[in-house]
Amino acid sequence: MSLFRITHIDEHRTRRRMRVLACNCRQALRMVEQQFGDAWFASAVRVEVQP
């Protein structure tokens, strides 16, 4: 699993930023959209975990 930093903006321009554990970018975005609804804009960036 990888850690992704997600930015989700809905149709009312409400911005949410969170971190999600997922296998890939598409799964991370899908998890957030299931929780908060369809996004007007969404981005996912994989975060490298430093040991």
Image (cartoon, grey):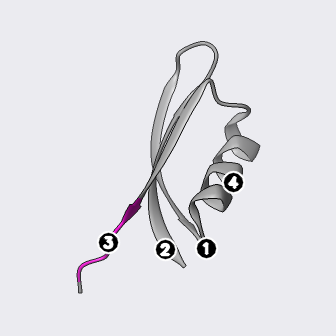
Which kind of residue does numbered mark 1 sit on? Cys
Which kind of residue does numbered mark 4 sit on? Met
**Residue 41 at x, y = what percent?**
56, 28
Q: CA distance from mark 4 to mark 2?
A: 14 Å
Identify the residue at horizontal 49%, vertical 74% (top origin). 2
Circle number at residue 48: 3
**Residue 10 at x, y = what percent?**
61, 23
Q: Which residues are magenta?
A: 46-50
Foreground disc of the pair 4, 1: 1
Which kind of residue does numbered mark 3 sit on? Glu
Q: CA distance from mark 3 to mark 4?
A: 20 Å
Q: Is residue 18 left or right of residue 49?
A: right
Q: Is residue 42 left or right of residue 18?
A: right
The residue that label 1 is drawn on is: 23
Circle 1 residues within 10 Å: few <14, some 14–19, many ≥20: few
Q: Residue furthest bottom?
A: 51
